[in-house]
Image: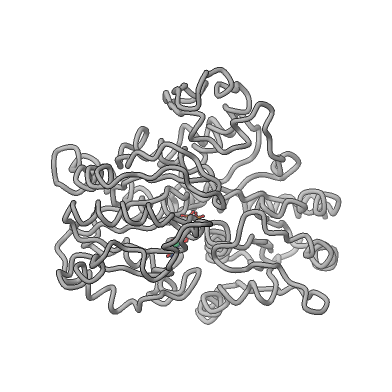
Amino acid sequence: MELNPAPVEIFFFPFVGGGHQIPMIDMARTFASHGVKATIIATPNHALSFESSIRRDQNSGCPISIHTLQLPGDLDISDVDMSASPQTDTSMLQEPLTNLLRQTRPDCIVHDMFHRWAPEAIDDLGIPRIVFNGSSCFARCVIESLSKYKPQEEVGSDFKPFVVPGLPDPIVLTRSQLPVFRKKPGGQIGKPEEKSFGVLVNSFHELELEYADHLKRETNKKTWLVGPVSVNNRTVADKTERGKKTSTDEQTILSWLDGKSLNSVLYISFGSLARLALDQLTELAHGLEASDHPFIWVVGKIFKSAGKENNDEENFFPAGFEEKMKESNKGLIIRGWAPQLLILEHESVGGFMTHCGWNSTLEGVCAGVPMITWPITAEQFMNEKLITDVLRTGVKVGNLEWLSWDTEPRTVVGREKVKAAVERLMDGGEKAVGMRTRAGELAEKAKRAVEEGGSSWNDAVNLIGELESCRKSAN
Ligand code: UDP
């Protein structure tokens, strides 16, 4: 018998782009904190965006490292920016990855679902393969139900509501809120989970217990909930450099927030990928001004409409808006990338207007802030339902139409809707207090889930145990 067996070794193979890369890196750090030898697989270019946080972990003794795959000549993934498209082709990594796996034979590899070629390439090697798909159990349950029962095909119009069958709660959607491929009869995507060892989820049982159980029953797959993984960012450096370096320095942001009262500020962000059109930015600006609540607004990429005149990246706000916000100290505008965790955790922040990306949703939950939901694409309309109808910690702004990230928006959410949603969330009325209280309770549960003995802690320990058993039975 081996007295000191080598620690379990897990490879983490993240995709490029914010919403998928960021949580996978944090997940690798979660397992390293449990003593697993965690190796992140990337290309040299890709590794640039997370190597300093990994170096900090290494300096504090964490068994984590980056392995960069060498590619011939100038070959690399075409886009490793935080806003890389989910369609980005990574297939040039197949050969170096499989060579590495043959040589090193880790106990397991966790790969992002967007490496579409990975299941076929890895499954022949006899190394347990775990899928990370970046979404909640709730959204996965909705997607499973839509594929199985196809209620979206029974309704006569895109805006006619239908109930998603077989779920623990009566979830109502419209076809207009679904991704294009799910609107069309027969629309399907591949199932990387099918032959996998299991699925890792960035979530925690107390947030969506019934949906986690439902998902396990429906898919018959081992599923471990090990989140929220963002809690691994404990230092200011980790929080300010997560994904990208912040565009406005953190001291400016923190002192601006220090000058505001408890729970008074609304934080607005649409994540790493969504692009708002100019008309939409204008309406949002008017709505915020009319609601008269302090805000931090992260203005990321902008959708440039073909054939429209005012496509000027610098000048898209209504005349005088930025100056007025500056003078009155009402609004802080960040152009580019914001230190989201640092902002959300500040006690002055009392609301989050979010596009309902799953990471942002969870980060809002961890910070205990109620949300204004403004879903745009991917599974964000499903996350909206979780926030507003199941957890009851947010209000909808009223966006009704799903949009592909690269498609010209057809509709805008008007300024009246923006103003109304901000007032409902931030006005301190009875309903707002209820949402805030529930949000605070969930934040406490999130904290407990990742502590020793908590549900996410236990799921991570259980997975490590299973991998140890696999190793023993193979010997
Ligand atoms: N993010 C950030 N600063 C920004 C924009 C995004 O730190 O200015 C982070 C955010 O905290 C989250 C991730 O990027 O962890 C975005 O993931 P999410 O699932 O919310 O949305 P996506 O970008 O995939 O649409």
Q: Return the x and y of residue 371 as percentages of the image width and height.
A: 31, 47
Residue under the point 47% across and 28% down:
174
Query: In the image, 401: left or right of 459?
Result: left
- Asked if residue 135 shows in the view, the reply is yes
Query: In the image, 301: left or right of 416?
Result: right
In the picture shown, does residue 61 fall above or below 412? below
Quadrant in the picture for the N terminus: bottom right
Q: Residue 77 occupies which quadrant of the picture?
A: bottom right
* Residue that protrudes farthest toward the bottom in the picture: 59
Q: Return the x and y of residue 342 as percentages of the image width and height.
A: 34, 67
Query: In the image, 409: left or right of 15?
Result: left
In the picture shown, does residue 117 fall above or below 169? below
Quadrant in the picture for the C terminus: bottom right
Q: Return the x and y of residue 412 as percentages of the image width and height.
A: 38, 45
Residue under the point 69% across and 63% down:
9
In the picture shown, does residue 375 fall above or below 264? above
Residue under the point 43% across and 50% down:
454
Q: Return the x and y of residue 253 as percentages of the image width and height.
A: 29, 73
In the picture shown, does residue 13 fall above or below 202? below
Residue under the point 57% across and 27% down:
145
Q: Nearer the viewer, residue 47 or 184?
A: 184
Q: Nearer the viewer, residue 67 or 360?
A: 360
